[in-house]
Amino acid sequence: MNPAPIILFPGLGADSDLFFEQKKYFGDRLFTLDWIAPISQECLADYCHRYADQFLGSSTFKESNGVYLGGFSFGGMAALEIGSAVHQKYPGKVKGVLLISSGRTQQIIRPLFQIQALIGARLPNGILKWVLNQQLVHGFLERESLSAEQAAQLATMLKKIDFSFFKWSLIACATWNPGVRYQSAQAPFPIFEIQGEKDPIIPFSNESEVVTLSGAKHLIQYSHSREVNQWLEQITHNG
């Protein structure tokens, strides 16, 4: 029996290149899917339920006995909501949701981020691009000790960014309200989390089930790719 596919969603302003290191490790078993266009003022849950309808028609889903959904940062939030929508129609088909530098509760949305996101969504594209270049490229380069190849990938992603989608996703992320649906007792599927101990974006969690990488920051799928890949493999190897 073929192992279950792993489908990962990237974070804000990123694309599938964010999982370059994971693609090298897992090969054809790992998939990244393109986002669909959002509807104006659509919340994250509604967007993901609409997205799930497209996902359910994909060959990746139809030809498998089960799938692992996951994502980095914002992509992890989306994976939870998409997984919830899939579970409603096909209970048990989602074998687990994998959260990389993300989280399952509203506590991961810091008040400062909410303010910054809502302001950023209203900036002209040119100014927003400059801010992103300073924060995402130069800021991460200073903090995360990325390789030259990884830094180049970040810069390339910035050049390809869809500002319409990005501005929507800023608001959707800042206003995400998952309630208690993804707490351990209420979750419709297993949820696994890994994060950096010194992540400046996602609040540190001391919950025992969260795997914490000592000294790591936000871009752990780059900076600690070996540990992240081993974590993904450990969870999904029997699936």
Image: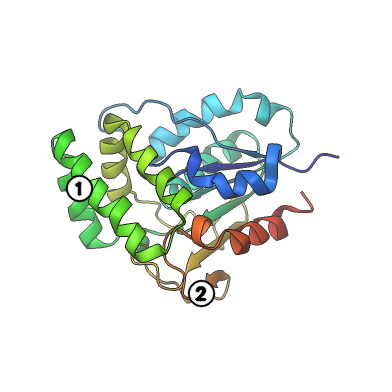
Q: In the rendered image, is residue 92 in sight?
A: no
- Circle 2: element type: loop
Q: Height in image: 145 above or below 72?
A: below
**Is residue 194 toward the left or the right of residue 68 in the image?**
left
Residue 83 location (% of width, % of height)? 55, 42
Q: Give 223 or 128, whichever is nearer the viewer.
A: 223
Find disc 2 in the rendering and name its residue.
Answer: 207
Residue 116 location (% of width, % of height)? 19, 53
- Displayed quadrant of residue 156: top left
- Circle 1: element type: helix
**Is residue 194 toward the left or the right of residue 166 in the image?**
right
Q: Amino acid at mark 2?
A: Glu
Q: Quadrant of the N terminus?
A: top right
- The residue depicted at 44 percent of the width and 52 percent of the height is 148
What crowding class fits label 1: few (fewer than 14 Cα within 10 Å), some (14-19), or many (20 or more)? Answer: some
Q: Amino acid at mark 1?
A: Val
- Displayed quadrant of residue 32: top right
Query: Are discs 2 and 1 less than 8 Å apart at CB?
Result: no
- The residue depicted at 46 percent of the width and 69 percent of the height is 216
Find disc 1 in the rendering and name its residue.
Answer: 131
Q: Give 209 or 19, whichever is nearer the viewer.
A: 19
- The residue depicted at 60 percent of the width and 49 percent of the height is 22
